[in-house]
Image (cartoon, rainbow, N blue to C red):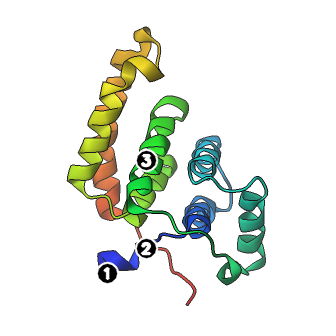
């Protein structure tokens, strides 16, 4: 499938697609919840927007969800924030890694951009984590770059309503 078919640039649709992926097994793990909460915040969704999107998924009215467009440069910032949250606050389960990989796919972030974002996070280590956590964070970052590449290459396409 062409890369453009994955691309999404409406804030609410990005959250909708990520939520649908997280709900594909019928439940949200704590890691998936953390990622979705961070994503909603990073996308600057309104306070009630995540619930409205969740309700639309459950009622099958997803086509009614639209929203403000997010610029390509902001996509990189959002991706970096969600990646950082995953590294610091979640268990990095396959479900959580699939969330990150799917977000990367929607934002059309290639390997070089992903590595650049990871390097930026590495440079910011002193500001975002306690010094004693830096080595563990770097290991997680390096492991996640490799794991995300594998999942990114193998993530299944969710069918979209047309």
What kind of element bears circle 1?
A: loop
* Mark nearer the N terminus (3 vs 1): 1
* Mark nearer the N terminus (2 vs 3): 3
Residue 145, quarter of the rendered image: top left
Identified at 39% across, 17% down, the residue is 126
Sort mark 2 into few (<14), some (14-19) or many (20+) by Cα contacts within 10 Å.
Answer: few
Identified at 27% across, 35% down, the residue is 119
Instruction: Give the farthest residue toward the left.
Output: 112
Q: Quadrant of the C terminus?
A: bottom right
Sort mark 1 into few (<14), some (14-19) or many (20+) by Cα contacts within 10 Å.
Answer: few
Left or right, 9 with reference to 26: left
Give the residue pinned by disc 2: 157
Inspect this view and state whether residue 93 appears. Answer: no
What kind of element bears circle 2?
A: loop
Where is residue 4 shown, x and y percent of the image?
A: 34, 78
> Compared to 118, does 28 lie above or below?
below
Question: Alpha carbon of mark 1 to alpha carbon of mark 2: how far?
Answer: 9 Å
Instruction: Give the farthest residue toward the bottom.
Output: 162
Question: Alpha carbon of mark 2 to alpha carbon of mark 3: how far?
Answer: 24 Å
Depth order, front residue of 141/124: 124
The reply to whether discs 1 and 2 touch (Cβ–Cβ < 8 Å) is: yes
Give the residue pinned by disc 1: 1
């Amino acid at each position: 499938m062409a890369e453009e078919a994955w691309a999404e640039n409406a804030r609410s649709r990005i959250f909708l697609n990520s939520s649908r992926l997280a709900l594909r097994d019928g439940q949200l793990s704590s890691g998936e919840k953390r990622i979705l909460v961070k994503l909603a915040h990073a996308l600057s969704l309104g306070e009630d927007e995540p619930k409205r999107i969740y309700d639309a998924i459950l009622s099958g009215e997803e086509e009614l969800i639209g929203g403000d467009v997010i610029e390509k440069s902001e996509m990189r910032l959002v991706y970096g924030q969600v990646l950082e949250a995953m590294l610091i606050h979640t268990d990095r389960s396959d479900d959580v890694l699939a969330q990150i990989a799917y977000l990367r796919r929607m934002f059309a972030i290639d390997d070089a951009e992903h590595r650049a974002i990871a390097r930026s996070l590495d440079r910011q280590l002193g500001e975002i984590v306690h010094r004693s956590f830096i080595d563990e964070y770097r290991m997680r970052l390096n492991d996640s770059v490799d794991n995300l590449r594998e999942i990114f290459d193998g993530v299944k396409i969710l069918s979209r309503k047309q």
